Image (cartoon, rainbow, N blue to C red):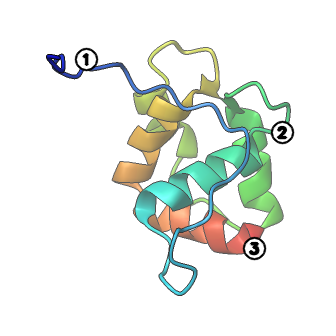
Amino acid sequence: GIIPDPVETPFFWAPACVPRSRDAGAPPTFTEKLMNVFYNLDINKQTIVDVDTLLMTLRSFGVTFVTNPMDTLRAADNSIDRTLNFVQWSLVGETNPALVDLLFFSFR
């Protein structure tokens, strides 16, 4: 028979669990860190991160802000509802990889 061409499907991420790297000896990829941090921040398991929860978590880890963190978060939260979905969180992470690292290693 004829094998049809693959159909592109949009990528939707729903965290059922935090995946581990396939190679246990390899350091986590940036995507794995993003997913892990998002999963840990999504305390109500609604696939969104509340901005207030994020700021509270950063403060609990001893982070002090020299600029207004809302400026960075507002740029990603285009719906202005003070929540971030995974795509929006990825935008925050891409512009602030040190933030993702800080949260990733603090949650461990």
Residue bearing the label numbered 3: 108
Let me know if residue 36 appears in the view.
yes
Q: Amino acid at mark 2?
A: Ile
Element carrying mark 1: loop
Q: Residues within 10 Å of mark 1 (few under 14, many from 20)?
A: few
Q: CA distance from mark 1 to mark 2?
A: 34 Å
7 is higher (above) or lower (below) than 75 = above
Residue 84 in the figure: left or right of residue 17: left
91 is higher (above) or lower (below) than 3 = below
Q: CA distance from mark 2 to mark 3?
A: 16 Å
Element carrying mark 2: loop
- Dividing the picture into quarters, in which one does residue 53 lie? top right
Q: Amino acid at mark 1?
A: Val
Residue 40 in the figure: left or right of residue 27: right
Let me know if residue 55 appears in the view.
no
Residue 43: assigned label? 2
Q: Amino acid at mark 3?
A: Arg
Q: Residue at x 71, y 58 (%)?
A: 58
Residue bearing the label numbered 1: 7
Task: Name the foreground residue: 46 vs 72.
Answer: 46
The answer to whether mark 1 and mark 2 are in CB contact below 8 A is: no
Q: Residues within 10 Å of mark 3 (few under 14, many from 20)?
A: few
Q: The C terminus lies in which quarter of the figure?
A: bottom right
